[in-house]
Structure formats: structure tokens, C-alpha cells
Image: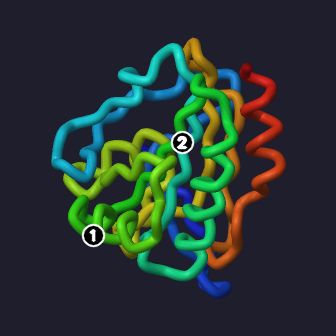
């Protein structure tokens, strides 16, 4: 497993990402995380759907809040063949509380807190903080990675239009 020093920054300070960097066109790595009820969830359980994976450092921070609310609003208008997952290191209980308070119903929140399996498989685990870097991935129905965006500065939002264009290209 490789470390990539300075791959992202937080308020300009460089951070190291741990894990395997994924490439568009390759098979999306499977991983296991837990849902807000502590049940295990794998990417492979969504085979046959277009999957948007939004990785965020913590739902309880301003930019992650904005991003997840935006994807929730977009998800409400997407095809039933699309699922939007938001993955963070937040505990499932905190995710459930946040979703209830924010009225988020169209995004599935999942926690990588146990093993950092997702973070390592996609190369977005921040070594210094044990949080996930801000990144968005789109996985086609057959399980191929069709889009990957690692947001260089953690305090910035992803390119929502590019994500939605990638989703449309998978349908």
C-alpha cells in the first residue's frame, strides 16, 4: 500500500494519503463499510446500479454538510438506477443523527470507521488524521470506475456538474 505525501491539503497544509490510488476504466475495488444500523454493506451489493461514492472527512463540518445536502438534492431527481453513497469515518450513530437533523433521505450514509477498508482501497485515507479525503467516484452498473475526482484542498467542494455528467454517461 502506497503513501502519497502532499496529495491533498487542509487550509494549505499538506497531508499524506494512504491506500491504493484507483484509476478510471479499472474495476472498482470492493469494500465493506457499515450502515447507520451497524449492518455491513459492500459496494458489490449495488452491482447493476450506477453508484456515486462521495467520500467526506466528517458530516459535522461545513463543507461536508453542504456537499452531502447537495448530493441529497441531486439524488432526488436521479434515475432509480442510481444510488448515492456518502462515506466518512464518522460513527454510524453520528451519521444517523446528522441525516435526521439535515433531512437527508436520498443519500445512503456509510461509515468506514472500523477498518478504513474503503479509504485504503480507494487511496483516500488521510494518514495524519485517520479521516477520508474529499473525493467523488462514479461506478458504472457493471462495476467499472467511470469517474474519479480527488479534491486537492479539503475545504473545497467537488465539481458537481462533472459528477452528474459522468452519471448521465453511465445510464
Screen quadrant of the N terminus: top left
Determine whether the residue tagged by mark 2 lies in a helix, strand or loop: strand
**Residue pictured at 68% horizontal, 62% vertical:** 151
Structural crowding at the residue carrying mark 2, measured as other residues with C-alpha within 10 Å and reported as few (<14), some (14–19) or many (≥20): many
Q: What colour-coding does the image apply?
A: rainbow
Estimate the x, y position of residue 20 in percent, counting from the top left: 49, 41
Left or right: where does residue 148 sit relative to residue 64?
right
Quadrant of res 140: top right
Left or right: where does residue 21 sit relative to residue 159?
left
Name the one closer to the observer, 164 or 28.
164
Which label's residue is closer to the chain start, 1 or 2?
A: 2
**Residue pictured at 64% horizontal, 78% vertical:** 155
* Residue marked by disc 1: 94
Q: Which mark is residue 122?
A: none
**Residue pictured at 54% horizontal, 21% vertical:** 49
Determine whether the residue tagged by mark 1 lies in a helix, strand or loop: helix
Left or right: where does residue 60 sit relative to residue 64?
left
User: Please, is residue 29 above or below residue 171 in the view?
Assistant: below
Name the one closer to the observer, 133 or 37.
37
Q: Which mark is residue 84?
A: 2
**Residue pictured at 23% horizontal, 49% vertical:** 115
Screen quadrant of the C terminus: top right
Estimate the x, y position of residue 59 in percent, counting from the top left: 44, 70
Amino acid at each position: 500500500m502506497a503513501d502519497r505525501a502532499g496529495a491533498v491539503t487542509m487550509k494549505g497544509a499538506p497531508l499524506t494519503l494512504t491506500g491504493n490510488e484507483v484509476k478510471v476504466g479499472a474495476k472498482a475495488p470492493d469494500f465493506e463499510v457499515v450502515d447507520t444500523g451497524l449492518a455491513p454493506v459492500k459496494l458489490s451489493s449495488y452491482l447493476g446500479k450506477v453508484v456515486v461514492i462521495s467520500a467526506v472527512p466528517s458530516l459535522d463540518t461545513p463543507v461536508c454538510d453542504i456537499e452531502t445536502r447537495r448530493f441529497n438534492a441531486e439524488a432526488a431527481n436521479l434515475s432509480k438506477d442510481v444510488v448515492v453513497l456518502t462515506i466518512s469515518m464518522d460513527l454510524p450513530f453520528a451519521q444517523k443523527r446528522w441525516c435526521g437533523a439535515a433531512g437527508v433521505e436520498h443519500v445512503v450514509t456509510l461509515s468506514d470507521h472500523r477498518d478504513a477498508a474503503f479509504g485504503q482501497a480507494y487511496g483516500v485515507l488521510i494518514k495524519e488524521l485517520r479521516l477520508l479525503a474529499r473525493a467523488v467516484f462514479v461506478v458504472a452498473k457493471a462495476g467499472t470506475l467511470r469517474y474519479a475526482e480527488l479534491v486537492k484542498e479539503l475545504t473545497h467542494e467537488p465539481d458537481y456538474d462533472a459528477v452528474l455528467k459522468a452519471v448521465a454517461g453511465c445510464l
